[in-house]
Image (cartoon, grey):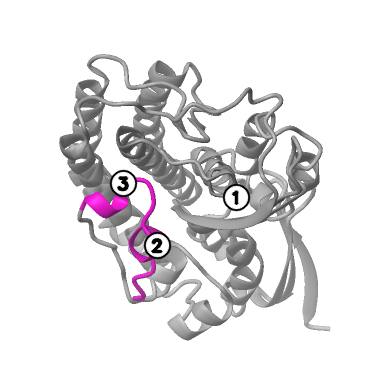
Amino acid sequence: MRELKLYFGPQHLGMVGNFSITLQVEGDRIIKAESNPGYLHRGFEKLMEQRTWIQNFPLVCRINVVEPDHMELIYSMGVEKLAGIEVPERGKYIRSIFCEMARVASHLFGAWAYANMLGFDTVANWAMYHRDLLLDMFEELTGARVYHIYLRPGGVRRDFPDGFTDRLVKTLHKIGGKVPDYNATFFENRLFQKRAEGIGIVTRKEAMRMGAVGHTLKATGLKYDIRKIEPYAAYDHVDFNIPTRTGGDAYSRLLTIRDDMIESVHMIFKLIDKMPKTGEVYTKTPNPFKWKIPAGEAYVRCESARGELGLYMVSNGGTNPYRVHFNTPSFNNGLTVLEKALEGESISDVGNIMISLYVVAPEIDR
């Protein structure tokens, strides 16, 4: 028999520890792959139906450990749509700035993981250090470094402290000043190109058929971004580009992530310039522990760092959601797209392809 069943993982860094893949291989060539997302952080949706509207905020963050802020945003948007709450103008700008900070921090984490996996330790250390600078800013604003619980129905928890935007701009300039070094050492390095070009190719037709989102879709040349298609927060008040590539491979996906991170930094500068200098940052709501949301159903979506993130929520008029269901970007990217991208590739590129698809495992088994 020439074929062999090989169990890859679950200890691999590519999927935060618990994700494993069953590979059908012939030699070192993958014939078929089957994803097993594991049982990390599961049961979110049913747990949320047992808790009050406000108690779900610490819970919803855990669905994406790397980027919890868009989970806060989408849940807040769902409650606002059900309750008919409007966010003040300044609150909208702060939300957009906050989410773009989260996008940059998430992309830096992705750059760390990919560079570390390929052996570019210097670049990995740079990325983690620069992400830590942003975590300092999150800590100053919210008191926490990872799970911030800053976005809330009606706006944000508190306004920016004095001088915060100036310190944020200074931090982003410090990170941006290192981009030429990132390019020279990693993104334009021939070793990175040889390991990533032509690896894990997903065509535009395949990506659309399998429901790929985010940079996986943009890397095939399709400009699909919820911030443009269905603007929310203050995204309709600033002009920005949607970075794309056409190769559909791991190389194109990583370059799309890099370009998206740079675009987010430019967008933060524009948002700061246009943001109202004064004004309310949240709309007052009833006692959150006794808050009864009017009966109804709502579907909302936003563009997380990994792509389109959706939430369907039903209220029966009680103090907690009746039904909750998330549409997460990692579900399709980490199951159907990953299995297709691995076919015909070498065992040595499994981690390469896994990380290039930018999947967070808790988003899959919710």
Q: Secondary structure at mark 1?
A: loop
- Callout count: 3
Tell whether 73 sits left or right of 60: left
Residue type of the residue flagged with mark 1: Val
119 vs 56: above or below = below
Whether residue 227 is in magenta: the answer is yes
According to the picture, the residue beneath numbered tag 1 turns out to be 360
Q: Residue at x 68, y 35 (%)?
A: 53
Label 3 to label 2: alpha-carbon separation: 11 Å
Q: Secondary structure at mark 3?
A: loop
Tag 3 or tag 1, which sits nearer the N-term? 3
122 vs 192: above or below = above
Whether residue 177 is in magenta: the answer is no
Are there few (<14), some (14-19), or many (20+) residues within 10 Å of tag 1?
many
Tell whether 333 sits left or right of 236: right
According to the picture, the residue beneath numbered tag 2 turns out to be 230
Q: Position of residue 239 (x, y in %)?
A: 20, 55
124 vs 316: above or below = above
Q: Position of residue 278 (x, y in %)?
A: 23, 24
**Magenta-colored span:** 221-238
Query: In which image quadrant can residue 179 be found?
Result: top left
